[in-house]
Image (tube, rainbow, N blue to C red):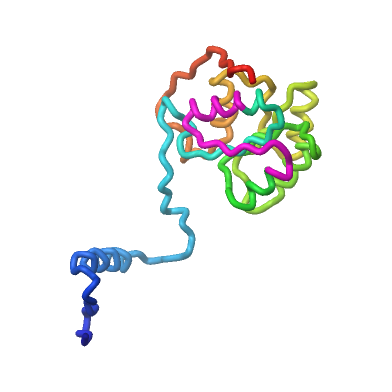
Amino acid sequence: MKRRRGRAALTPCQPKARLIGHRRLVSSLRGMTKMDDRVTDLDFRPRPTPDRPLLGMTILVVEDSLYASEALRLLCLRSGARIRRADCIASAERHLQVYRPSAAIVDLGLPDGSGLDLIARLDGVQPRVPILLGTSGAEREAAACEAMGAGADGFLPKPVDSLALFQNAIIAHMSDDMKPKQPRVAETGRLAPDRL
């Protein structure tokens, strides 16, 4: 087929409607003054709602305790967040090679090393995981200071059994554009996962 000036040639398999849609896209892109390879302006993540303030987030939970991991899974799901779980540092690093979470919650006592080392590594890489939280059940004040010293943004004391505490710990470190815009009613009751 011959090409006419100003028109793209149609092939037998290409419907005319598809070409017209392509022309609209090209003409809308012509009005843009600057194009680059960043996709940050095209954010298709769901926006948080008052009922699900962590909607659109992916949280990496690095926790070796099945009970604590299940409790955090329930808290993430009730808050609207997706969850990725790792039970050791090696598993967390495999996740991080494939996924870039919105937040990471790291237990300080892991079977193959210290969670403080993982927090320090996550704090030092670029791009940084936006929200880093440490968690521990032993010597909470000392553990919180150590986690913050390693580069964590905050600390969740274990057991985490309050939905409001969990959500507030993450929302406090969210960027302003991702924070829920409307007031929310946080459940203050205690959450108890099934015993494993």
Q: Quick one: quadrant of the N terminus?
A: bottom left
Where is residue 99? Give x, y as percent. Answer: 58, 49
The picture places residue 177, in percent across and down from the top left corner, at 46, 40
Residue 60 sits in which quadrant? Answer: top right
Position of residue 49 in the picture relative to residue 136 (left or right): left
Mark count? 0
- The answer to whether 156 is drawn above or below residue 13 in the figure is above
Is 40 placed left or right of 30 in the picture?
Answer: right
At x 69%, y 21%, the residue is 158
Quarter of the image with the C terminus is top right
Residue at 63% across, 35% down: 61
Q: Is residue 30 above or below residue 5?
A: above
- Residue 182 x %, y %: 40, 28
Is 84 situated above or below 25?
above
Viewer-proximal residue among 41 and 65: 65
At horizontal 23% and vertical 77% (from top left) the residue drawn is 11
Q: Is residue 73 magenta?
A: yes
Residue sitting nearer the eye, 124 or 12: 12
Picture quarter containing residue 105? top right
Residue 36: x and y, percent? 46, 65
Q: Is residue 46 magenta?
A: no
Tell me where the magenta segment starts and ends, as one range: 70-91
Task: Name the residue at the bottom extreme.
Answer: 2
Closest to the observer, 162 or 93: 93
